[in-house]
Image (cartoon, helix red, strand yellow):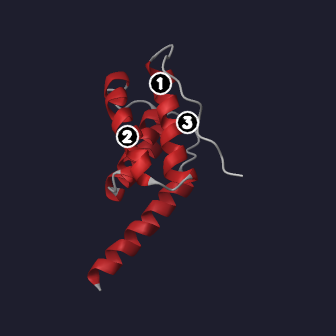
């Protein structure tokens, strides 16, 4: 049985509630369904929401969202950069960084792609 996408919503109590909703939709299409084409509208919708709600980039959720946006757009180097910044942000606030596995995976894929370009 296939996992179902988050239920459709049109109204939100605040910007962060909408960001969380769009983030979940982006995760669903990018990872659960592995369909980056269907994920792109959510990446495109999420970016301006983050700019408005987290213009300084001080939110850990915001950093995670940016890394997904960059991944969806195929910019793995930028996704890695954002995750590293998120890790520094977590460490500076004494919060456990739970994205280490994703950061390692991105780094491995980026290295593999770099090696493939050299050959």
Give the percent coordinates (x, y) of residue 109.
43, 68
The residue positioned 50% from the left and 47% from the top of the image is: 29
> Would you place residue 50 above or below residue 65 in this image?
above
Which residue of the protein is positioned furthest toward the right in this rendering?
1
Tell me which label, 1 or 3, sits earlier in the chain: 1
- Where is residue 40, by image quadrant? top left
Q: Residue under label 1, please give it.
A: 18
Give the percent coordinates (x, y) of residue 76.
36, 58
Which residue of the protein is positioned furthest toward the top in this rendering?
13
Q: Which one is in front, 19 or 79?
A: 19
Tell me which label, 1 or 2, sits earlier in the chain: 1
> Would you place residue 113 above or below residue 13 in this image?
below
Q: Indicate left or right for 52 with 34 as reference.
A: left
The residue positioned 47% from the left and 24% from the top of the image is: 18
Q: Residue under label 3, please give it.
A: 94
Does the rendering let one see residue 9?
yes
Q: Which mark is residue 41?
A: 2
Q: Which mark is residue 33?
A: none
């Amino acid at each position: 049985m296939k996992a179902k996408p988050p239920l459709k919503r049109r109204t939100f109590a605040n910007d962060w509630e909408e960001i969380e909703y769009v983030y979940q939709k982006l995760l669903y299409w990018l990872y659960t369904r592995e369909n980056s084409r269907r994920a792109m509208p959510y990446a495109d919708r999420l970016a301006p929401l983050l700019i408005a709600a987290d213009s300084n980039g001080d939110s850990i959720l915001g950093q995670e969202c940016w890394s997904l946006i960059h991944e969806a757009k195929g910019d793995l180097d930028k996704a890695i950069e954002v995750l590293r910044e998120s890790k520094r942000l977590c460490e500076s606030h004494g919060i456990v960084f739970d994205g280490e596995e994703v950061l390692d995976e991105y780094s491995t894929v980026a290295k593999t792609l770099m090696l493939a370009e050299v050959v």
